[in-house]
């Protein structure tokens, strides 16, 4: 087959009709569960000011340095396709004065996000996430509840072996001291680090802990652990998070080197995996944590926030791997066949009558051959075919054909909807 002239851009993909059921299932599951917990939906623009992300996520992060799609408008605005949701939702929270609403305020969203990274299995340049944020509550119980919600979502999507990796990365009180300890240790092992981590050592040393290179992981495995150097407040907060997770009987691993890849996190960070994928790919299905300084950093009031984002395509990969079954959608049971121009006119109106009556119907208005239309009706496995020809159109009647027996009878056009409701046993 000849290669088409135009194709989807590298790392971006079409979501074909047969794939839509996965997206729909995830969106419906998330919406149902988070609504129970009091979350309200918000939608933010796909384009935001680029500075929102550079300031919020951090200038030295891979997202801002390498992965943002940016553009300059004719009016001189410097914009970026959103690489994640949190900064945009925080911007909306500040801009619309949502801090005046009763707190905690719980918001969620779905949609595409964009990162110019190297496409590979489970990673795209345009991909989809769902995102949850809780504003105005600093208690550790919120951290645990968000993890519980994520666990519930994956359970409802038939993921059985789910594990939470959790850590605390401290705050502005205790993290600077830990950074000094970490930098001193990493400098003494600098020759064993990859090129990226040598740069990170200068700009954002905590991000070295997040490196997936094997040689860097060997160095990191002997590095000082931040949980040994937390201030009293962060230590108490993290202890409470773990106690709540124990009370909820959620399976978790304490990962003292988990830091996440964004600068805005404080205290709790977590990622959720399928347990059997930990050693293979180490690609999280969901990840999040607490970012109590971000609202103030972006110009708002001092507001604690905790949130999480889930990768839709990654979750779909897992659903496919376990062959998740979907309930069969109810197929239309009536086919409308017509012959001739007058019959076609009548059929258009009749089709709308059936739509209003919520009776599923298939048609083939572009064809005039009765044989071809009956053939399509047979393939569609409908129970009945309605036949409207020139004679029936003039007499305002329609023929009902039972596709199993081949028997036919004629009914007045204005009675056909009621007759089909009776035959299909549809309640009025």
Image (cartoon, helix red, strand yellow):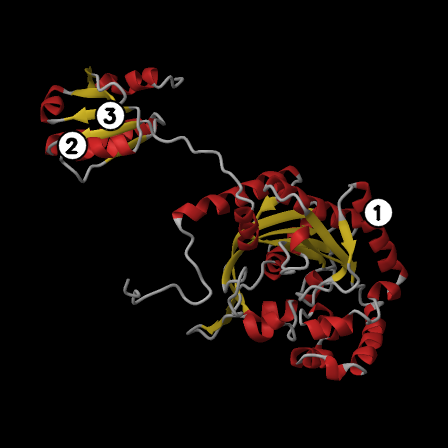
Label 1 vs 2, first from the N-terminus: 1
Total number of numbered discs in the rendering: 3
Which of marks 3 and 1 precedes in the sequence?
1
How far, Cα to Cα, is label 3 from label 2?
12 Å
Q: How would you rate the neighbour count of disc 2 (Cα within 10 Å): few for under 14, some for 14-19, many for 20 or more? A: few
At 75% from the left edge and 82% from the top edge, which residue is drawn?
190
The nearer-to-camera label among 3 and 2 is 2
Residue 274 visible somewhere in the drawing:
no
* Position in image of residue 364 (x %, y %): 22, 36
Vertical position of residue 407 compared to residue 59: above or below = above
Q: Secondary structure at mark 1?
A: helix
Query: Which mark lies nearer to you, 1 or 2?
Result: 2
Residue 405, quarter of the rendered image: top left
State which quadrant residue 421 falls in.
Answer: top left
The residue indicated by pointer 2 is 371
Disc number placed over residue 385 in the picture, else none: 3
Nearer to the camera, 277 or 292 = 277
Task: Give the mark, 3 or 2, whose residue is nearer the N terminus.
Answer: 2
Q: Is residue 23 left or right of residue 35?
A: left
Q: Are marks 1 and 2 in contact (CB under 8 Å)?
A: no
Q: Label for residue 243?
A: 1
Q: Measured from the top left, where is residue 76 in percent x and y?
A: 47, 75
Q: Position of residue 167 (x, y in %)?
A: 78, 59
Note whether residue 76 is visible.
yes
Q: Secondary structure at mark 2?
A: helix
Quadrant holding the N terminus: bottom left
Q: Is residue 287 left or right of residue 67?
A: right
For the residue pair 395 and 48, the one nearer the viewer reads as: 395
Tell me the CA gap for discs 1 and 3.
63 Å
Say above or below: 376 vs 42: above
């Amino acid at each position: 087959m000849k290669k088409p002239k135009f194709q989807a851009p590298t790392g971006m993909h079409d979501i074909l009709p047969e794939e839509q059921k996965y997206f729909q299932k995830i969106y419906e599951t998330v919406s149902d569960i988070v609504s129970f917990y009091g979350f309200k939906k918000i939608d933010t623009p796909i384009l935001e000011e680029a500075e929102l992300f550079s300031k919020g996520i951090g200038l030295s992060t891979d997202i801002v340095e390498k992965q943002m799609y940016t553009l300059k408008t004719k009016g001189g605005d410097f914009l970026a396709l959103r690489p994640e949701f949190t900064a945009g939702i925080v911007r909306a929270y500040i801009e619309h004065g949502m801090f005046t609403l009763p707190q905690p305020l719980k918001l969620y969203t779905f949609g595409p996000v964009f990162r110019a990274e190297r496409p590979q299995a489970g990673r795209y340049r345009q991909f989809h996430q769902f995102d949850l944020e809780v504003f105005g509550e600093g208690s550790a119980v919120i951290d645990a509840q968000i993890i519980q919600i994520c666990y519930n979502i994956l359970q409802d999507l038939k993921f059985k072996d789910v594990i939470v990796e959790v850590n605390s990365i401290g705050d502005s009180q205790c993290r600077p001291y830990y950074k000094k300890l970490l930098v001193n240790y990493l400098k003494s092992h600098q020759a064993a680090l990859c090129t990226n981590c040598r740069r990170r050592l200068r700009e954002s040393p905590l991000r070295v802990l997040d490196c997936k290179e094997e040689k860097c992981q060997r160095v990191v495995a002997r590095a000082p652990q931040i949980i040994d150097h937390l201030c009293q407040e962060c230590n108490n907060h993290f202890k409470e998070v773990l106690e709540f997770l124990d009370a909820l009987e959620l399976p978790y691993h304490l990962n003292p080197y988990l830091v996440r890849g964004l600068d805005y996190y404080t205290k709790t960070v977590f990622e959720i995996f399928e347990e059997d994928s930990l050693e293979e790919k180490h690609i999280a299905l969901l990840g999040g944590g607490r970012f109590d300084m971000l609202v103030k950093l972006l110009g708002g009031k001092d507001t604690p926030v905790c949130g999480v984002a889930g990768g839709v395509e990654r979750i779909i990969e897992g659903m496919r791997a376990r062959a998740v079954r979907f309930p069969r959608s109810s197929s239309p049971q009536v086919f409308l066949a017509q012959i001739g121009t007058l019959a076609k006119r009548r059929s258009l109106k009749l089709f709308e009558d059936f739509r209003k009556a919520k009776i599923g119907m298939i048609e083939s208005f572009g064809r005039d051959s009765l044989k071809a239309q009956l053939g399509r009706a047979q393939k569609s496995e409908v129970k009945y075919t309605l036949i409207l020809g020139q004679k029936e159109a003039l007499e305002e009647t329609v023929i009902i054909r039972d596709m199993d027996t081949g028997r036919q009878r004629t009914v007045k056009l204005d009675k056909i909807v009621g007759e089909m409701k009776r035959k299909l046993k549809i309640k009025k």
